[in-house]
Image: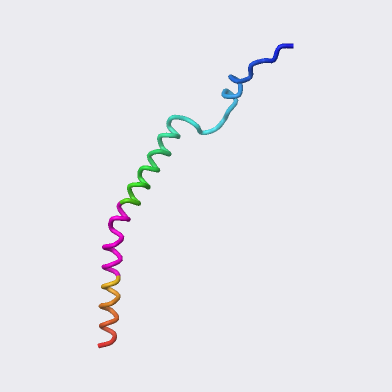
Amino acid sequence: MKKKNTGASFWKDESGDVSIKGIAITVAILVIVGLALVFVKDKLDIWLELIWNKFMTMIDGMIT
């Protein structure tokens, strides 16, 4: 008996969300998250300094 080639039927029967549109949406989300992380990383030092100074001003106001 000759074995049947089932390679084509394997891909035909595959029912997942692996499409060009799905891949494009995933890549777009990763790019947006990456850009957000870069933005936050650059601004984090400034934000922490502003918050620290605000707390120190509030504490100085309580003491005096």
Residue 49: say if magenta.
Answer: yes
Residue 8 figure quarter: top right
Q: Is residue 28 above or below residue 48?
A: above
Horizontal side of 56 relative to 8 (left or right) equals left
Looking at the rendering, in which quadrant would you find the N terminus? top right
Q: How many marks?
A: 0
Looking at the rendering, in which quadrant would you find the C terminus? bottom left
Horizontal side of 51 relative to 16 (left or right) equals left
Residue drawn at x 64%, y 16% is 5
Q: Residue 4 location, x and y as percent?
A: 67, 15
Q: Main secondary structure of the magenta part?
A: helix
Q: Residue 30 location, x and y as percent?
A: 40, 43
Residue drawn at x 63%, y 19% is 6
Residue 51 figure quarter: bottom left
Residue 48 figure quarter: bottom left
Q: Is residue 54 above or below residue 18?
A: below
Q: Is residue 58 above or below residue 12?
A: below
Horizontal side of 5 relative to 42 (left or right) equals right
Residue 21: say if magenta.
Answer: no
The residue furthest right is 1
Front residue of this view, candidates 21 and 45: 45
Residue drawn at x 71%, y 12% is 2
The residue furthest top is 1
Image coloring type: rainbow
Q: Which residues, given as a range, are shown in magenta?
A: 39-51
Residue drawn at x 29%, y 85% is 62
